[in-house]
Amino acid sequence: MASEKITRQKVVVGMSGGVDSSVVALLLKRAGFEVVGLFMKNWEDDDDDEYCSTRQDLIDCAAVADVIGVELEAVNFAAEYKERVFSAFLAEYRAGRTPNPDVLCNAEIKFKAFLDHAIALGAERIATGHYAGVRQVREGDSAGRFELLKAADTGKDQSYFLHRLTQAQLARTWFPLAQMKKAEVRRIAKDAGLPVHAKKDSTGICFIGERPFREFLNRYLPHEPGEIRTPDGKVIGRHVGLAFYTIGQRKGVGIGGVKGAGAEGEAWYVAGKDLARNELVVVSGHEHPLLQKDRLLAADLSWVGGSAPAIGGDYAAKTRYRQADSPCRIDRLENDALELVFEQPQWAVTPGQSAVLYQGEVCLGGGVIQ
């Protein structure tokens, strides 16, 4: 980073008002880059202070930019977000699936609309506070390709959410926190006097914030109540609409007073949705066979490395973010769909979530579970 040519590069940092992106801006400024902070507003509907932190986040961003001594620009991507991310989010829920909007937000907003805007500002690169890495692999005399890597802080690794990025996006992206632990990031922020050094990490879906999830969906999805039944057809309750439940869900199903079919005291879990009959299928017990799958089909594939991996192979995959890598193989790969077979059954494999493939520390890409 030290050469005179490189230190004059303009880098636009996606600043959220949190400690991670703030430290990224600080580190790049210290390294001599021309740093511009960019705050993205992606949601405007019912944007209020009770649940949405956008206003406070922008205030925090401005305070950090002032301490570091960098320019800050706020840009509104709400229209792009609604068109590219939120519409797909609702369509998935209407189809009975449980989407992961953060995956689509990264591909369509944070590394597309944001990157385009940064280039228009004259930046050569963008940087974010994601916990992940990028490595350039040179091939002969060519510049080669770029690999998306897991972060050193395995508990914070976010490569799962970034698996739909393209080679062109990776080529212009820096993840300065790739080799850092969260505790070190907070220490750097505190030592530098950044006002967000102890700020709590944001949780939940970006446009919902901390508001009750079902309350939010109520505004956008139709209510079609129906029966809750067991696999053997016994009706044990009523659901409020299939869109409001996800595979593996235990809390909020609404049948807590009904005794389970298994051992006494075992909880009920959502195991399936019968869309044709508008029925919610539940099972008793965390380890019920209907909650265990040793294979899955994924479609809408995206390979961050630029090409699909080989059939067979020594791979591992995640079927949800907070999950350890699970050894698997590719059994079939054709027509933008792949079949994964796992060595050990996976719990609550959920249609609409992403199945993301890894080979060691390298994230290969993945697809949407069908």
Image (cartoon, helix red, strand yellow):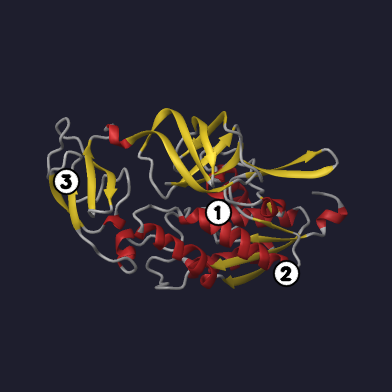
Determine crowd level at label 2: few under 14, some 14-19, many 20+ residues with C-alpha closer than 10 A: few
Residue designated by label 1: 197
Residue designated by label 3: 256
Determine crowd level at label 1: few under 14, some 14-19, many 20+ residues with C-alpha closer than 10 A: many
Q: Distance between the residues labelled 2 and 1?
A: 29 Å
Mark 2 and mark 1 in contact? Answer it, CB < 8 Å.
no
Left or right: 263 in relation to 210: left
Amino acid on which the number 2 mark rests in the picture: Leu
Q: Distance between the residues labelled 3 and 1?
A: 41 Å
Could you say whether the residue bearing mark 3 is in a helix, strand or loop?
loop
Residue designated by label 2: 121
Residue 291 percent coordinates (x, y)? 31, 36
Residue 121 percent coordinates (x, y)? 72, 69
Instruction: Specify whether residue 218 is in view.
Output: yes
The answer to which of marks 3 and 2 sits earlier in the sequence is 2
Quarter of the image for residue 142 reads top right
Quarter of the image for residue 8 reads bottom right
